[in-house]
Image (tube, rainbow, N blue to C red):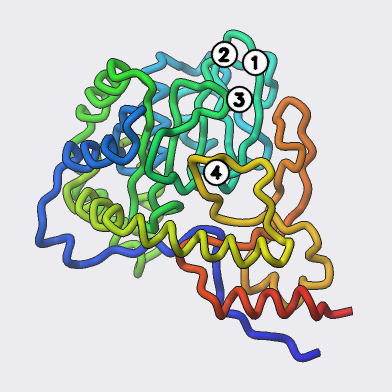
Amino acid sequence: MTKLKLQPKFIWPEAKFSSLSFFKKTHSDTVEAELKTLYPNVFPVLFSSARAGLVNLLIFLKANKLTNVWTPLYSSHCVLESISRIGFPCSDILNAQISVVYHQWGYKQEYSSQNQIIIEDSADSFFLPGDIIFPNDGNFQLVSLPKSLGCYGGGILLCKSEEDAQMIRKIRNTKINNTYLHFLLKLLGRHNKQLYFYWDSFESALGYPPNLLCTDVLNKMEKIDLFVKQIKDNIRTFKAEGIYSEENTLPDRLPCAIPFQNFQNLTNTVGNSIKEYRMFNTSYCYNNTHFEKVLPIPIHKDINKLFIEQFLRNVHNPIS
């Protein structure tokens, strides 16, 4: 069988920035008001990134280096770096005071604990307009806008309490200095790895979203209905092929990828296209984990019919 050359795709949509954002001034209050309209049962606080939102939240929760903050195995470096900036990353659920529960790629992961503060990490969930679900009854939920809407930055902290949101916003607003310059470092970092490194090193310590970023976020939010249609169309196609299951999904969000387990015969044809394998908790419960190597099949807004057709052709005609 001839190998198919698929166009490279990633688990999350491509983060894009429009130069038109330079010509319009948008404040974070405007974006947060629009988010409140979309998600009426929560109180959103906009940050420059989800990792910065996590750091500001830990400050609000009065965490320190003696505070054990649990996060799952195989957590990303940005989560571990953010926790380390304020608290102490912990792998022992029983000894944690705060837990960051990652709903990987938009799938529900259950977690039970006593006397712990739970932060729902829904970084790469695509939330549908309407009421937001807190799967493990946490008081806070984090979303990464590059991973959901393809923004060139931005993160949302969804709070159950308006009072909490106001206090966290005050903490964020103390970090307004140099945020515009810092965002420019990220833009220039597309062409200079050293500049991107500087941005990446300091991002979680800041958090105030500059007007340029707010304009970009608002522009992407205006296309949410189109994005929803694109993702649902992709899901419908994979579901018809028996590859996608609604089990462990949540009604308030759409996943960005499918954890595909039967990838052994697809390694040479599809693996390089989707770039990498990941570890995924197939027990869907962090109190009793079972991590397996899976091939994440992206289904987000950037995935087109040609990619899906070529992937399905490989599934039906695997290399022996």
Where does the image place residue 196, in percent across and percent down from the top left?
37, 57
Observer-nearest residue: 50 or 133? 133
Q: Which of label 4 and label 3 is nearer to you?
A: 3
Q: Secondary structure at mark 2?
A: loop
Question: Which numbered disc flags the more N-terminal residue, 3 or 2?
Answer: 3
Front-most of residues 208 and 258:
258
The mark nearer the N terminus, 2 or 4, is: 4
Which amino acid lies under the numbered mark 2 shown in the image of this protein? Answer: Gln
Task: Look at mark 4 in the image and give the residue it sits on.
Answer: 77
- Please provide percent x and percent y for residue 165: 30, 23
Please report the residue visible at 36 percent of the width from the left and 66 percent of the height from the top: 190
Q: Secondary structure at mark 3?
A: strand
Is residue 264 shown left or right of residue 220? right
Callouts 3 and 1 close, C-beta under 8 Å: no
SS under mark 4: helix
Which one is in front, 24 or 188?
A: 24
Disc 1 to disc 2: CB gap under 8 Å = yes
Spatial separation of the CA atoms under disc 3 and disc 2: 10 Å
